[in-house]
């Protein structure tokens, strides 16, 4: 599910951020100057008239080669899901469309059962779409009904043409919690195609059986 979040998020944000690059080119802004757009809202619709994506913020500051966005909120609408992303700050490079989301970054996507998968980090979330890389930094937490993953950093490597070919590498104080069972490692690698997880760097597993939970025995 996390691979799906990252792929759609990157497509959504890159498309919406590209509108800033199209409306303001380096030649249109004098060196050292800036333009500000207050309480902006951008959206796109599909051919059938339904919503495709939307992004809004309290302020967009257009510089010569990049755009600063404050209090950004974005949504991507698929046939069955609505993906949410927000951050207090975002910086977008207008030339290569690389983006950094900073401060209280949060992603949310609904599951079929009505629950949500939530990914948070202090930031920055560095998106390098052309290189097929997204990096979540500082206090990364992936929370869903199946459990939680904690790490200092999580790097997502993806194929922009084939979203099934992805790899997620979580590093630094990795902890995976499922029910009352906890796994620790310095590094955890999730392979999107095989859905296997490899723990490296002093991996340790604490397992509690159902009997342990009810009796307290070990």
Image (cartoon, rainbow, N blue to C red):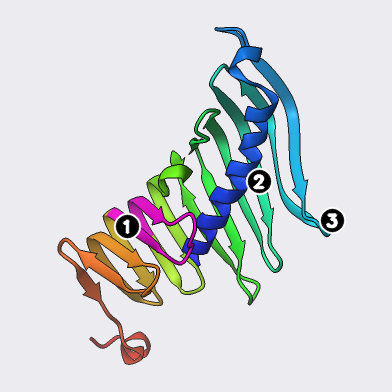
**Most foreground residue, 168 or 193:** 193
Residue 62 in the image, given as x and y percentages of width and height: 62, 21
Q: Is residue 123 visible?
A: no
72 in relation to 139, above or below: above
Residues at discs 3 and 1 in contact (Cβ within 8 Å): no
- Residue that appears at 69% across and 30% down: 58
Gap in angstroms between the C-alphas marked 1 and 2? 25 Å
155 part of magenta stretch: yes
Residue 116 in the image, given as x and y percentages of width and height: 59, 65
Name the residue beneath numbered marker 3. 49
Element on which disc 2 rests: strand
**Most foreground residue, 66 or 150:** 66
- Which region shows up in magenta? 150-171
Name the residue beneath numbered marker 1. 169
Left or right: residue 118 compared with residue 154 = right
Left or right: residue 15 compared with residue 184 = right
Q: Nearer the viewer, mark 2 or mark 3?
A: 3
87 part of magenta stretch: no
**Most foreground residue, 71 or 93:** 93
Q: Is residue 124 visible?
A: yes
Q: Main secondary structure of the magenta part?
A: strand
- Residue that appears at 60% across and 44% down: 13
Gap in angstroms between the C-alphas marked 3 and 1? 38 Å
123 in relation to 204, above or below: above
To which quarter of the image does residue 126 belong? top left
Instruction: Identify the mark nearer the N-term, 3 or 1.
Output: 3
Instruction: Identify the mark nearer the N-term, 2 or 3.
Output: 3
Q: Which mark is residue 74?
A: 2
Residue 117 in the image, given as x and y percentages of width and height: 54, 64
Residue that lies at the very extreme toward the front in this rendered image: 161
Q: How crowded is the residue under tag 2: few (<14 C-alpha within 10 Å), some, or many (20+)?
A: many
């Amino acid at each position: 599910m996390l691979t799906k979040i990252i792929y759609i998020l990157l497509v959504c944000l890159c498309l919406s951020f590209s509108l800033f690059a199209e409306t303001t080119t380096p030649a249109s802004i004098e060196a050292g100057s800036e333009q500000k757009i207050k309480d902006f809202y951008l959206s796109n619709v599909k051919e059938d008239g339904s919503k495709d994506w939307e992004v809004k913020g309290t302020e967009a500051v257009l510089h010569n080669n990049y755009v600063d966005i404050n209090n950004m909120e974005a949504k991507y609408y698929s046939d069955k899901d609505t993906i949410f992303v927000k951050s207090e700050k975002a910086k977008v490079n207008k030339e290569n469309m690389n983006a950094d989301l900073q401060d209280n970054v949060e992603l949310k996507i609904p599951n079929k059962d009505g629950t949500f998968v939530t990914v948070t980090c202090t930031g920055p979330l560095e998106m390098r779409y052309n290189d097929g890389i997204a990096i979540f930094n500082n206090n990364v937490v992936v929370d869903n009904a199946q459990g939680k993953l904690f790490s200092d950093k999580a790097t997502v490597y993806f194929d922009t043409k084939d979203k099934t070919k992805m790899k997620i590498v979580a590093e630094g104080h990795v902890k995976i919690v499922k029910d009352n069972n906890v796994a620790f490692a310095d590094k955890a690698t999730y392979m999107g195609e095989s859905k296997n997880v490899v723990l490296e760097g002093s991996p340790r597993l604490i397992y509690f059986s159902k009997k342990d939970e009810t009796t307290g025995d070990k």
